[in-house]
Image (cartoon, coloured by chain):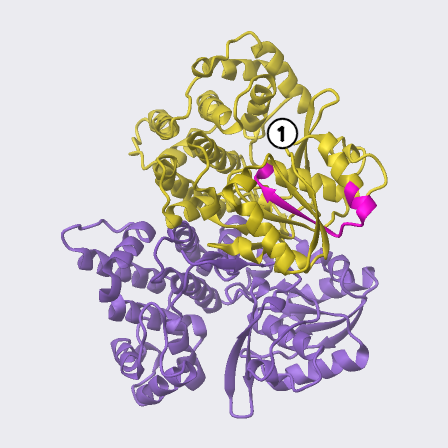
Chain colours: A yellow, B purple
Amino acid sequence: MDNFVFDNYTKIIFGKKTEETVGEEIKKYGSKILLHYGGGSIKKSGLYDKIIFSLNSAGVEYIELGGVQPNPRLSLVKKGVDICKRENVEAILAVGGGSVIDSAKAIGLGALYDGDPWDFHARKAIPERMLPVGTVLTIPAAGSESSDGSVITNEDGWIKRGLHSGCMYPTFSIINPELMYTLPKTQIANGCSDIFAHLAERYFTNTKGVEFTDRMIEAAMKTVINNAKAMVDGSKDYDTWAQVVWAGTIAHNNLLNTGRVGDWGSHNIEHELSAHYDIAHGAGLAIVFPAWMKYVLKHDVSRFVQFATRVFNVENDVFNPTKTAMNGIEAYERFLQSLGLPKTLSEVNIGDEKFELMAKQAVEIGGGKQGNFVELKENDILEILRMAK
Amino acid sequence: MDNFVFDNYTKIIFGKKTEETVGEEIKKYGSKILLHYGGGSIKKSGLYDKIIFSLNSAGVEYIELGGVQPNPRLSLVKKGVDICKRENVEAILAVGGGSVIDSAKAIGLGALYDGDPWDFHARKAIPERMLPVGTVLTIPAAGSESSDGSVITNEDGWIKRGLHSGCMYPTFSIINPELMYTLPKTQIANGCSDIFAHLAERYFTNTKGVEFTDRMIEAAMKTVINNAKAMVDGSKDYDTWAQVVWAGTIAHNNLLNTGRVGDWGSHNIEHELSAHYDIAHGAGLAIVFPAWMKYVLKHDVSRFVQFATRVFNVENDVFNPTKTAMNGIEAYERFLQSLGLPKTLSEVNIGDEKFELMAKQAVEIGGGKQGNFVELKENDILEILRMAK
């Protein structure tokens, strides 16, 4: 096990009706805030009214900035930074999913910085402080509600960049699974695929002596496997949702990678798919991750046997570990398909015309390679894309 | 699943040689500190010298207060409070196990309070702020290094009282498993028993819909089971130790009871044993907990079947759930015995002469009862003690 520092200070307020406490909670950090949200679904659902009522009751003054898009954009971040500086905003409240929260974090950094807000994501400046960011989560999976990360897209060149810093954990996050029941079926499936992928990226490691985090990751994986189908099928059972939503937060809050190095190759390959095609991140991961697994299987068959037997209860054929491992990967594929997720690129009408380009760009971002469990070069990524065809 | 707030802000610095960073770390919270420790084992081991070197290198001024005893005492807490007030101490560094850390927390509360430091533990005052407490952990199990609790004994009447508050998490904790290799064999066994008991207290709940935390607790239990024997047998393998030590911290940091109500009956029965006899907490739990399990088994056989099959890999006799459950409890007993822990009170020379008294006092502290999974009255506790005879 590697040395580690775990320093996640996000206060989690989890459960039914917890959104009603948002005014009192954010008031601890400021009496004038930026209220940040997306495309208006929170107005349709009635959540917006509840938030406004709570803010007013607590005497919190708010300035609204809606319109965050999936793959949140720098132009809106800049608008938010301008508002924060001009109006002396003291805290930011992000109401939405990962995109809104990521955007709020970028605004929070920019508000306390004199230069261009893009400097941080462009690695020209190191984040040291951020306005307090509180969140009310409406979409599970991204994990940004208790992570130290933010991904922003610069429309000038359409450059998408992730950033992590110890100062970028939200101050608090309010998580009420009830707010998520009405999400579209495909979005629920994509979310479950993304949560599982966050766990799998951490699971496939070369670090030895990590039994405890292995088992914790397996616990979260099994929880997702056991509950995801019911959610996609329209369940409004609180406990079913609460298991997966809480597991989704823990999956990405850095606890499950304490003392170990994750892989992240599949995520980076998928980012190329999302960049070049109109495919949701979770759907892309459902296609890429099993292909990646088959490609890297030989690197550490034992770890895949552990994955197969412990996570998917595959019977261990001790005379044929590779077969056991493959059975595990196929069980993972069946799980994804049971949620209605695609298995191949052709199913989502993605041809091979950009395979070379995507493989090239994926390794460019990673300095000539991607992945830690197995280091992938351009050719390896090309091969994985072909296997996913 | 119940609503919950999870707000654990302790920064964990985990790994080899991490104690060397203590000066730089504590300096963030103050340049004049109270250095708090126990009976001097840290001087024998050389840890004391390393800490002093690190504090000096960072330019941190320290005032020493050693002498913390197991079941840390109010008189020393008062001494510490006086020093902090008189010398304008800005932070406290606790070097030791749970007793030293608990004592440091009580001092940290008292230092910012005008009244009697006992007021908090006596429920006459509500803790609202504490001097920053940093820790260097030398004994695993108590969990105080990342918990919100402190147990102090008032020598005036020998009253032992626990206290919990959101302001009582340590600011940081440095955890290097290497510092623990030289602990006596019995202390390691007791520690493993205590960690397992912290997990089991959380596991046995009436709260429905808690699959995720169930599985996380099981992950930690299996980790302890798989590594404890080697530790007791003298292993100096870092990874073996690191699994259990990290699991021990997580076992008691409130994550694994998010959204559920634990039992804590066995802990409270054991506290009576420790109060009346010279028996270590972990050894007492090894005797009490299996007896408690057998006594309450019928309350929820299914939960005990889950414990047996998932934690101890007992084969599930679906035609006889009670037998399956009992096999699980017996597997737990065999695990404890494999560590050299006692199975019965008679093994540790405790007779039945104080059974009535202990049962009476145990429920007195709990307002006429103890336990949440099953509410125990005086008679129930008496019966459990008899079963442990």
Q: Position of residue A337 (x, y in %)?
A: 37, 26
Residue found at the very far bottom of the displayed protein: B156
The N terminus of chain A: image quadrant? top right
Give the magenta-colored segment's residue range.
A83-98
Q: Which residue is mark 1?
A: A71
- Which is more toward the observer, B236 or A281? A281
Q: Secondary structure at mark 1?
A: loop
Q: Position of residue A10 (x, y in %)?
A: 61, 52
Amino acid under disc 1: Asn
Left or right of A158, for residue B14:
left
The answer, for residue A112, to whether it is visible in the render is no
Chain of residue at mark 1: A
Q: Is the residue A81 above or below the residue B33 in the image?
A: above
- Residue positioned 59% across, 24% down in the render: A271
Q: Is the residue B220 above or below the residue B381 in the image?
A: above
Left or right of A105, for residue B155:
left
Residue A297 quadrant: top left
